[in-house]
Image (tube, grey):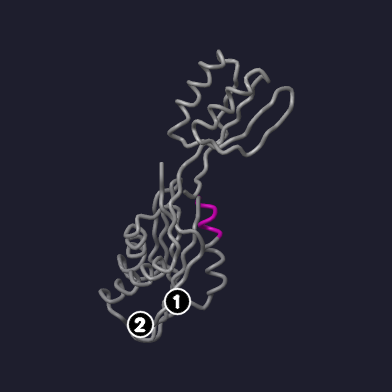
C-alpha cells in the first residue's frame, strides 16, 4: 500500500479584502497529533477570527470544520485542496483575521480553497509505502535461510538480538509478507518463529 503525504510543515498567507488568511499544513498520523496541533494553533493565533481546518488520515478518515464561517465555505474547501493532491495523513488549517469587509459566500469559499491550495503547493509531497515490522526468531542452524529470504524480499533489518536464540527485527513490504513467511517456513521446516509487531510507512 502506498500513500502520498507532505514531508514537513508548510505555510502560506495572503490578504483578500483586508482579511488575512494564514494557511498551515502538517504531516499527521492520528487524531492525537491532529488535536495537539489544533490546540497549539488556537493558542498561538488566539486573536484570529476563525481557525478552520480539514484533515485526512488512514486511521481516522477525513473530517473538517468551518469554525463559525458559513457552511460549505471553509472546511470542505480545505478538504478539497487535500484531495486535489491526493494526500493522506495531512492536517490543513486556514487561520483568518477578519479585516472588516465581508467577502460574500462565493468569494469566501474561493479564498479558503486558495489558502489550502497555496499551502500544499509550497509543501514537499512525498510517497510512502507500508511496511510491516516483524520479528524473526530462529536457531543458529537457520541463519543462512533467514538472511536469504530477508534479502530476497528486500527487508530492512533494524536490530539483531541475541537472547536464548538469535532474533532479528526487520521491516518488510506488507505485500511481500505472506510469501516471505511461507517460503521461510518451508525452507526451515517451520523451526522459525515469525511475528508481526505493527506497521509503518516509509518514504520510497
Q: Position of residue 109 (x, y in %)?
A: 30, 71
Q: Position of residue 25 (x, y in %)?
A: 46, 64
- Badge 2 is on which residue? 16
* Residue furthest top as drawn: 189
Which corner quadrant of the image does residue 100 belong to? bottom left
- Circles 2, 1 touching at the beta carbon (< 8 Å): no
Q: Residue at position x 52%, y 58% from top?
A: 35
In this rendering, would 6 be left or right of 188? left
Q: Position of residue 59 (x, y in %)?
A: 46, 45
* Residue furthest right as drawn: 163
In this rendering, would 144 be left or right of 65? right
For residue 49, the mark is 1
Q: Residue at position x 31%, y 66% from top?
A: 71
Dot 1 crowding, Cα within 10 Å, few <14, some 14–19, many 20+ = some
The local secondary structure at tag 2 comes to: strand
Nearest the eye: 77 or 121:
121
The range drawn in magenta is 30-36
- Check if residue 34 falls in the magenta segment: yes
State the quadrant of the N terminus.
Answer: top left
Whether 145 is drawn above or below 175: the answer is above
Whether 28 is drawn above or below 183: the answer is below
Amino acid at each position: 500500500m502506498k500513500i502520498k503525504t507532505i514531508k514537513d510543515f508548510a505555510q502560506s498567507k495572503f490578504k483578500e479584502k483586508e482579511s488575512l488568511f494564514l494557511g498551515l499544513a502538517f504531516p499527521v498520523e492520528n487524531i492525537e497529533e491532529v488535536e495537539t496541533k489544533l490546540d497549539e494553533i488556537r493558542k498561538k493565533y488566539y486573536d484570529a477570527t476563525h481557525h478552520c481546518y480539514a484533515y485526512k488520515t488512514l486511521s481516522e478518515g477525513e473530517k473538517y470544520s468551518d469554525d463559525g464561517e458559513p457552511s460549505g465555505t471553509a472546511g470542505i474547501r480545505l478538504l478539497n485542496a487535500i484531495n486535489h493532491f491526493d494526500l493522506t495523513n495531512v492536517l490543513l488549517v486556514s487561520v483568518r483575521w477578519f479585516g472588516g469587509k465581508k467577502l460574500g459566500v462565493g468569494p469566501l469559499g474561493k479564498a479558503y480553497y486558495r489558502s489550502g491550495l497555496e499551502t500544499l503547493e509550497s509543501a514537499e509531497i512525498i510517497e510512502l509505502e507500508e511496511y510491516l515490522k516483524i520479528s524473526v526468531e530462529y536457531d543458529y542452524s537457520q541463519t543462512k535461510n533467514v538472511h536469504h529470504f530477508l534479502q530476497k524480499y528486500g527487508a530492512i533489518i533494524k536490530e539483531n538480538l541475541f537472547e536464548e536464540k538469535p532474533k532479528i527485527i526487520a521491516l518488510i513490504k506488507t505485500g511481500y509478507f505472506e510469501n516471505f513467511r511461507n517460503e521461510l517456513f518451508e525452507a526451515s521446516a517451520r523451526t522459525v518463529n515469525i511475528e508481526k509487531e505493527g506497521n509503518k510507512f516509509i518514504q520510497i
